[in-house]
Amino acid sequence: MGILNYSTSIPVNRSISEIQGKLVAHGARAIMVNYNNDQVAESLSFIVPGKEGELPFRLPANIKAVETIMRRDRLPGYTREGQAARVAWRILKDWIEAQMAIIEAEMVSIEEVFLPYLLANDNQTLFQVMKNRGFLLPPGRGE
């Protein structure tokens, strides 16, 4: 069994458009697609209004990781140009749909779901900041 959506033929732009639609439906005020030097969409940044003001987030589409798994498992289509990007963005679209479902059920807030992707210092996500700290909170926090 391969990773989710490994055989998708849905273009990256369609998956991104569907993600944008879900985010807008849940209050996103601004959305930007970030591209790498090869003009491949690598992440999506967006702003959501929160109780404490506007919150900026960046969701990565880790295409290299998907490509590594597809090659390792020799999944059908793993050598097709752009297949890892199509798969990565489709997985991200499905994940966002699932997250929006638990938000709609009022099981969690949008801030809870996307907290690791909150942009913090130096254009890093909160996850990246915490990883660099060995997942330790600053002194006097979390007690």
Image: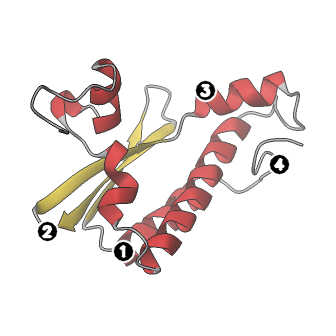
Q: Nearer the viewer, residue 34 or 131?
A: 131
Tell which circle, 1 or 3, labels the residue nearer the N-terminal end: 1
Q: Residue 47 appears in which quarter of the rendering?
A: bottom left
Horizontal relation, residue 15 to residue 69: left or right: left
Q: Which residue type carries mark 4?
A: Ser
Horizontal relation, residue 119 to residue 82: left or right: left
Residue to which mark 1 is pinned: 26
Relative height, residue 108 to residue 95 (above, below): below
Tell which circle, 2 or 3, labels the residue nearer the N-terminal end: 2
Q: Nearer the viewer, residue 134 or 81?
A: 134
Tell me, yes or no, whether the two marked residues, 3 and 4, touch with CB atoms within 8 Å. Answer: no
* Mark-to-mark CA distance, 1 and 4: 29 Å
Q: Residue at x 47, y 80 (%)?
A: 105
Helix, strand, or loop for circle 2? loop
The image shows residue 136 at horizontal and vertical percentages of 27, 25
Tell which circle, 4 or 2, labels the residue nearer the N-terminal end: 4
Q: Residue at x 38, y 41 (%)?
A: 34
Horizontal relation, residue 67 to residue 133: left or right: right
The image shows residue 108 at horizontal and vertical percentages of 39, 68
Mark 2 or mark 1, which is nearer to you? 2
Q: Nearer the viewer, residue 104 or 2?
A: 104
Residue to which mark 3 is pinned: 64
Residue to which mark 2 is pinned: 51
Q: Residue at x 24, y 41 (%)?
A: 119
* Mark-to-mark CA distance, 1 and 3: 29 Å
* Mark-to-mark CA distance, 4 and 2: 41 Å
Tell me, yes or no, whether the two marked residues, 2 and 3, touch with CB atoms within 8 Å. Answer: no
Q: Which residue type carries mark 2?
A: Lys
Quarter of the N terminus within the rendering: top right
Residue to which mark 4 is pinned: 7
The image shows residue 44 at horizontal and vertical percentages of 40, 48
